[in-house]
Image (cartoon, rainbow, N blue to C red):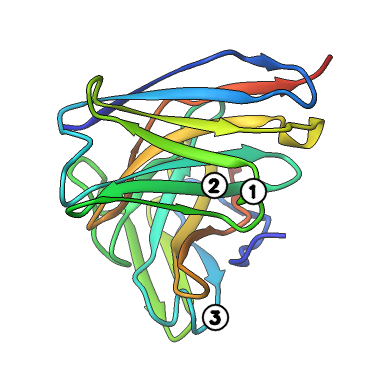
Amino acid sequence: QVQLQQSGPGLVKPSQTLSLTCAISGDTISSNSAAWNWIRQSPSRGLEWLGRTYYRSKWYRHYALSVKSRIIINPDTSKNQFTLQLNSVTPEDTAVYYCASSYANGLDPWGRGTLVTVSS
Amino acid sequence: QSVLTQPPSASGTPGQRVTISCSGSSSNIGTNTVNWYQQLPGTAPKLLIYRTNQRPSGVPDRFSGSKSGTSASLAISGLQSDDEADYYCATWDESLNGFWVFGGGTKLTVL
């Protein structure tokens, strides 16, 4: 059974980079049947999918248009985890950030979430 | 503004049946299956229904899902007090390079 453990700072200053990590247990990040996603939730924007990475003979990354110019999602095969980097953050990026796996049945399971506040 | 449209609230009394709707378009619900999630305060969304009408193990058969055209529904029968939560629909949207889309959520109150 896949489990996801999130880590990273809860406070980021405006214009800096938000960095979060999601450690995977119960499967490998290079699985040919999984994708690894980042999603955020805020009162103003609701649930918003940010992007994903997955391996199908090579690594793929897909990002939401709303953050495409600022986001990088990277796999780390040595640690069986994946990371989120969101650059040039503003207070509008304040949200609870979740990692989630997706298999044939959809986004499941999710990490426990990390509240990230963008403030000086 | 969420891509999928849900009513912001729903309510019912214990034992009643309630339904929550989710409206989309031909590029999302019209093409793909729908998932439903239950979110309790301070916790991550939990998968309730997958592939439109399938329940993960451990989810009571009081919960059921259906789809018609570009709309989907979640039905909860025999309403219980601990069903009080936020419910979200989600599906894959085929436009552009593809992306996950969500409803704005429905707050279910058990009166």
Q: Return the chain for callout 3.
A: B
Q: Earlier in the sequence, mark 1 or mark 2?
A: 2
Q: Is residue B68 above or below residue B13?
A: below
Mark number displayed over residue B25:
3
Q: Chain of mark 2?
A: A
- Amino acid, disc 3: Ser
Please report, as a chain letter, where disc 1 is located: A
Q: Are marks 1 and 2 in contact (CB under 8 Å)?
A: yes
For the question of whether residue B74 can be seen, the reply is yes
Disc 1 vs disc 3: which is toward the camera? 1
Q: Name the residue tied to disc 1.
A: A67
- Residue B93 vertical position relative to residue B41 in the rendered view, above or below: below
**Residue B18, position as x, y percentages in the image:** 49, 60
Label 3 and label 2: CA atoms lie apart by: 21 Å
Local crowd at mark 3 within 10 Å, few (<14), some, or many (≥20)?
some
Q: Residue at x 53, y 49 (%)?
A: A49
Looking at the picture, how far across and down is residue B30, in whole percent?
44, 82
SS type, badge 3: loop
Please, what secondary structure does the residue beneath circle 2 have?
Answer: strand
Q: Are marks 1 and 3 on the same chain?
A: no
Label 1 Cα crowd, 10 Å radius (few <14 / some 14-19 / many 20+): some
Q: Name the image quarter holding the C terminus of chain A.
A: top right
Q: Up-down: is A40 above or below B75?
A: above
Going by the image, does A33 lie left or right of A70?
Answer: left
Q: Quadrant of residue B42?
A: top right
Q: Residue at x 38, y 65 (%)?
A: B34
Q: Quadrant of residue B63?
A: bottom left
Type of the residue with mark 2: Leu
Marks 1 and 2, how far apart in space? 7 Å
The residue under label 2 is A50
> Which residue is pictured at 60% across the width and 30% down the height?
A96
Instruction: Classify residue A3 as left or right of residue A113.
Output: left
